[in-house]
Image (cartoon, grey):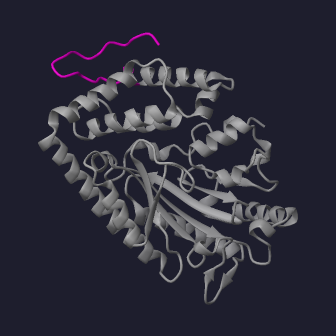
Amino acid sequence: MDEWASVPDYGLGWLDASGPNADIVLSTRVRLARNVQGRAFGPRARLNDREAVLRSVRDSMNRIELLGGSHVIELVDLEPRVRRILHERRLVSSDLLGRDDKGPEHGAAVLLPDEHPFSIMVNEEDHLRVQAVVSGLRLQDTWSLVDRLDDALGREIAYAYHHEFGFLTSCPTNAGTGLRASVLVHLPALVLTKEIGKVLQGLSQVGLTFRGLYGEGSEVVGNFFQVSNQTTLGQSEEDLIDHLERMISQVIQYEQHARQVLLRDAANVTEDKIWRAYGLLRYARSLSFEEMMNLLSGVRLGVSLKLLPGLRVYTLNKIMVFTQAAHLAQAAGKDLPATECDAHRAAYVRRILATEGVVPPGGEPAGTERT
């Protein structure tokens, strides 16, 4: 089997910056946790349980219209680099990949459809993690898609459900709806104006939490925050989605106001910071991922404020994904040590930015350099 042929372009739809408020909201993600009735789940699940769950998913595919053309990829069959690429695209979690360098468990798999922006993780912390990731702030649309798929799966697979507690999950904090909705937002102006602490504290007081780019356990880099609901029990899915959307809309307004404050009170400093970030990205010969993300944050702010004409948000989103270690290694055709990876990252960024017609203030478009 050609491992890479199954996933060369999959999971990249959210990069296109086509959704509402795409300059601030990179993506919307909705996930449902489900377990199969009569099968042990969580740490108690044994090989026969995991294999039975995977068979149930395979058997259901042909009877569910939304899954037409889908294929199931078992992670133990993939090279480590390809598994990491799936993680870098947010198609699988670190839990599904396996902890402590032991690799994925037998039965761990991901279902990838051909025409829809969702995926299904099989035998992660829960038997099924049904999720969709789309561009911009589109919580209602994303929830509607995931809900349709969940209903179709529920007609084929008996879920573990309790009349009082709702859907049963490995972690009690997911019980009830099993819903986790999250929005990945870029908030540089709130960070620069030192308002971010107050905003994040306010979110925690209304039942929301924040994490880094890859969710739980990941650090915040480049002023990107993943905001999601904490509560899953005692409220309907629609109420949880509506609450998160209202809160994120407020955060967007706060960020937009902070950006106007920067332009009003510190225009020269802000513009200098943005162009310095662009210059470093445009000409650096070595970039760590964290350094690149911090510089990318400044450039992204400049694009939103129309201080970097000719540069697209899509390009910046693409850089975020394709400069991660596994993607760089795949492009190079070999695993890369850290220092070599930093050089390849810088070369990729220079090459991509050279194709965009950015015009410096009072200057001509920069010519394409050799990389």
Is residue 352 toward the left or the right of residue 154 in the image?
Answer: left
- Residue 157 lies in magenta, yes or no? no
Task: Identify whether 229 is placed above or below 103.
Answer: below
Name which residue lies at 37% across and 66% down.
Answer: 203
Kindly tell me whether residue 62 is visible in this rendering.
Answer: no
Quadrant location, the N terminus: top right
Name which residue lies at 59% across and 69% down.
Answer: 150
Total number of numbered discs in the rendering: 0
Q: Which residue reaches farthest bottom?
A: 164
Residue 27 position in % (x across, y down): 43, 52
* Magenta-tinted stretch: 353-371
Residue 304 position in % (x across, y down): 26, 41
Q: Which residue reaches farthest left?
A: 264
Name which residue lies at 17% across and 47% down.
Answer: 260
Is residue 304 toward the left or the right of residue 58 in the image?
Answer: left
Task: Identify whether 245 is placed above or below 335.
Answer: below
Q: Which residue reaches farthest top?
A: 370
Residue 272, picture quadrant: top left
- Residue 359 lies in magenta, yes or no? yes
Task: Identify whether 225 is placed above or below 205.
Answer: above
Kindly tell me whether residue 343 is visible in this rendering.
Answer: yes
Q: Which residue reaches farthest right?
A: 48
Is residue 39 toward the left or the right of residue 248 in the image?
Answer: right
Q: Main secondary structure of the magenta part?
A: loop
Residue 51 position in % (x across, y down): 83, 61
Residue 307 position in % (x across, y down): 22, 33
Query: Which of the pair 215/40 is nearer the observer?
Result: 215
